[in-house]
Amino acid sequence: MTEAALLTRRLSLRRFTVADAANVVSLDGDSRVMRFLERGTKSVEEVRDTVLPRLVSCHLCHPGFGYWAAETRTEEVFIGWFGLRPVTPSVDAIVHWPDARDQADVVELGYRLRCSAWGQGYATEGARALVRRAFADPGVREIVATTMAVNVASRRVMEKAGMSLMRTVHVDWPEPLDGTEEGEVEYRLRRNDWRAGSGP
């Protein structure tokens, strides 16, 4: 049985399938989308054999969490993805936190959207939906997220989802991107704070 899609007012978030390889290649192949993430492009084969299995496996290891392909509800157009990845916290930067092995009490919120979807509120809408989904699990105590300090748009989404800036860290990347010298910002939202605000 296929898991029902997570619906918001304008979005349908569904499980990834092998048919999404071309969508992911197109998304990750846009240098504007990847500006704050990584350099280089992936082939259809690499996405099909490596990227998609990784996105799908999170659902299998941690039911209720994982990565969802995002489509507009009216046109059913793929615009990107949103994810909740259970992580094991450490003193390192969030970008180095490994996947959780057991019960997920801390999850990382992530999202990646096509340029055509920018500036329309989709990122905030999807992020808020996943915040609610995460805290629907009574075992989750905190949601975390990170981005480059210079990525103002992504930081704004985190704030609109109810998250607060906790710290700025500097990571020694092997191939640093422009702006890396400003550091990585880490945002967090604890369950009690979310409840106090009645949820964003």
Image (cartoon, grey):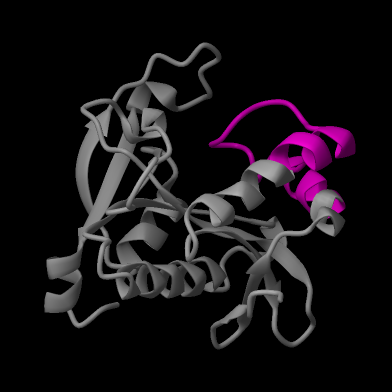
Q: What stretch is highlighted in magenta?
A: 22-51
Where is residue 76, by image quadrant?
bottom right
**Measuring 63% from the left and 80% from the top, which residue is drawn there?**
4
**Measuring 52% from the left and 66% from the top, which residue is drawn there?**
123
Report the number of numbered marks. 0
Whether residue 15 is situated above or below residue 186 in the rendered picture: below
* Front-most of residues 179 and 110: 110
**Measuring 57% from the left and 73% from the top, which residue is drawn there?**
120
Whether residue 97 is situated above or below residue 15 in the rendered picture: above
Where is residue 2, by image quadrant?
bottom right
Residue 33 located within the stretch drawn in magenta: yes
Left or right of 144 on screen, residue 11: right
Left or right of 177 on screen, residue 197: left
Considering the image in quadrants, where does the N terminus appear? bottom right
Residue 102 image position (x, y, % from top left):
35, 46
**Measuring 20% from the left and 38% from the top, which residue is drawn there?**
167
Left or right of 167 on screen, residue 6: right
Residue 92 image position (x, y, % from top left):
27, 25
Residue 49 image position (x, y, % from top left):
80, 36
Considering the image in quadrants, where does the C terminus appear? bottom left
Residue 91 image position (x, y, % from top left):
21, 27
Residue 176 located within the stretch drawn in magenta: no
